[in-house]
Image: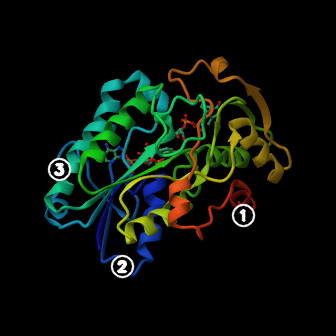
Amino acid sequence: MNILIIGGSGLVGGNLYRELQKQPFVQKLLATHISFPVPETVFLDPLVNMSPEISAAPWDVIVHTGALTHVDRCEQDKELSYALTVQSTLNLLQLAATSNALFVYLGTDYIFNGENGPYAEDDAVDPLSVYGLHKLEAETAVRQYKRHLVARITNVYGAEVRNKNFIAAMLQRLKQEERPEVKAPYDQYATPVNAADIARALVLLIRDGAEGVYHLGGTDYVSRTQLLQRINVYYNNRIHIQAVSTAALGQAAKRPLRGGLLSGRFMAAYPHFTFTNIDDYLKHT
Ligand SMILES: NC(=O)C1=CN([C@@H]2O[C@H](COP(=O)(O)OP(=O)(O)OC[C@H]3O[C@@H](n4cnc5c(N)ncnc54)[C@H](OP(=O)(O)O)[C@@H]3O)[C@@H](O)[C@H]2O)C=CC1
Ligand SMILES: Cc1cn([C@H]2C[C@H](O)[C@@H](COP(=O)(O)OP(=O)(O)O[C@H]3O[C@@H](C)C(=O)[C@@H](O)[C@H]3O)O2)c(=O)[nH]c1=O
């Protein structure tokens, strides 16, 4: 299979690249970046143009991990959010159509309103933020394309060069400060998932030509404050946690409070797949 990963310099794309590299069914593998080159990636901005190398290759699979993932920034700059999240997807769908490629899209639990999560694949959507709205608009376009696979994920953690994710950012602060003070909401729940598990799951789905919508949620259901407590178990209680309500944070974008995802459809298809959990990750950091 010839596979193109859009966003190979990111958390999910980088982990997927490393997992796909090990697979015998992959013949050609190319990953892209925009602003943050890493050794494995080539530059590609789908809003500008496709290089001849990218547009000429007959891709069997295109995995689009690109989006404006800074949730508050999306609220403040709707046009940028639309361009990076929706328009990029529309452009890449055109590329996919030229070789009848499977289009793999990474969705989010922020398309739900967080009143009664964790959510199953068929639950009704109701995004609260510009980020959620644009992710839903892009996902809807993908679902109209004939060969699509949507993997919805949330609260991703794991190995990442830029340490942007919640857990990595905390571990970074623990390296720099003896007793970091961290404010975090006690009322926002989700099912954190390791990017390496997402990569393993996507490899199976891609290998088997799976289509449709799958939720990939971890087995922990925790608030952000509880996430910090779990880190503290392994770091001698050094994080000084200030637990506050989401409302008190005064953020630009609303968050779903009871978010998270149930991986029922995926588990029915792969009953032997095991998701690792936060402790599995933290005990090796
Ligand atoms: N992280 C999370 O907790 C969650 C993520 N998701 C979704 O999963 C996907 C991957 O997330 P994550 O890995 O964390 O994201 P990152 O921000 O870590 O990485 C995004 C990657 O995509 C590239 N990129 C950004 N915008 C575009 C674009 N318009 N066209 C092409 N490439 C682009 C970036 O390039 P560069 O950095 O080089 O500029 C980077 O390589 C996103 O679609 C996100 O919405 C969903 C739920 C939770
Ligand atoms: C890092 C950090 C976050 N927060 C707040 C911000 C926010 O309300 C909440 C969660 O922060 P996060 O950075 O985990 O979440 P957020 O940026 O809302 O994260 C999301 O990323 C996008 C891409 C998704 O699609 C979502 O599924 C989710 O994973 O905690 C703090 O209060 N203190 C902190 O130190």
Q: State whether residue 50 appears in this view.
A: no
> Nearer the observer, disc 2 or disc 1?
2
Name the residue tied to disc 3. Answer: 94
Q: Does the numbered disc 2 mark a residue whose Cβ is under 8 Å from ligand 1?
A: no
First in residue order: circle 1 vs circle 3: 3
Disc 2 residue type?
A: Phe
Name the residue tied to disc 1. Answer: 284
Disc 3 residue type?
A: Gln
Name the residue tied to disc 2. Answer: 25
**Quarter of the view holding residue 268:** bottom right
Q: Crowding at label 3, few (<14), some or many (≥20) Cα neighbours within 10 Å? A: few
Residue 12: x and y, percent? 47, 55
Residue 86: x and y, percent? 30, 37
Classify 191 as above or below 13.
Answer: above
CB under 8 Å between discs 2 and 1: no
First in residue order: circle 2 vs circle 1: 2
**Quarter of the view holding residue 136:** top left
In space, the residues marked 3 and 2 are separated at their CA atoms by: 25 Å
Disc 1 residue type?
A: His
Q: Residue at x 53, y 23 (%)?
A: 254
Classify 73 as above or below 232.
Answer: above
